[in-house]
Amino acid sequence: MRALLALMLVSVALDGHAKTVLLTHMPLQWRPTSELASGTTDMDATTIRFETFQDVRNDKEKVGENLEDDAPKTFTTTDDVGAFVSSHMRQLFDRAGLKTVDGDAAVTIKGEVRQFFARETSTYNSQVEVQLTVMDRDGNTIWKGLASGEATRFGRSYKIENYYEVLSDAVVNTVSSMLRSAEFRKALSRR
């Protein structure tokens, strides 16, 4: 019996892929490690409403991949990436001291998530890109542009916690770049 157990342990130890649990259909979790750089508060009196962003990426489930081995390992989710990004961007606006609301607002922010992905080689590298449209109360476009952010971190190989952190940090860095943009701040300060 001991010999059979020892043989099974050696077999599992020799075949590293037998121990790998694939990260498929995982829920997204918000785990930022970066600090928000909010720039200025010259638009803090403006009420802002976020619409749920649309996910326009080609492969809506795939949000990451590990390329350390010959056979890539993917990280997929069935969560709504557009809703995840817009809700956490709103949360970051609130943290920056801006006034977000659910109803009538001076400006509305709409978005299309064009990229939300983490690639792992020797480090985790992520990028988020969102095409944003800022509209006034009457539905007129007052600003349109691409907002993006990146993040890099070290971590243990193919660990979901590291994917969560690097993707969350890319969202934080996207919002930081938005709030530092003079044109974006000017659009938000319209009353």
Image (cartoon, helix red, strand yellow):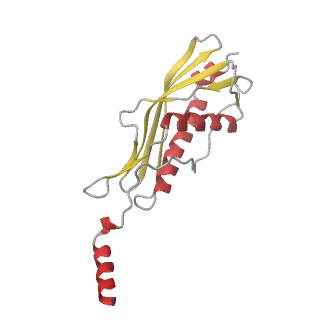
- Residue at 61% x, 46% y is 35
> Residue 177 or 109: which is nearer the viewer?
109
> Residue 53 or 167: which is nearer the viewer?
53
- Residue at 65% x, 34% y is 93
- Residue at 66% x, 24% y is 48
Number of callouts: 0
Query: Is 140 situated above or below 108?
Result: above
Residue 119 lies, in percent from the top left, at 38, 48
Quarter that holds the N terminus: bottom left
Residue at the farthest bottom position: 2
Residue at the farthest front position: 1
Residue 62 lies, in percent from the top left, at 38, 43
- The quadrant in which residue 185 appears is top right
Query: Is 88 situated above or below 147?
Result: below
Quarter that holds the C terminus: top right
Residue 87 lies, in percent from the top left, at 59, 36
- The quadrant in which residue 61 appears is top left
The answer to whether 6 appears left or right of 162 in the picture is left
Query: Is 46 situated above or below 86?
Result: above
Residue 7 appears in the rendering: yes
- Residue at 64% x, 22% y is 188
Residue 38 appears in the rendering: no
> Residue 8 or 114: which is nearer the viewer?
8
The answer to whether 46 appears left or right of 81 in the picture is right
Residue 3 lies, in percent from the top left, at 30, 88
- The quadrant in which residue 12 appears is bottom left
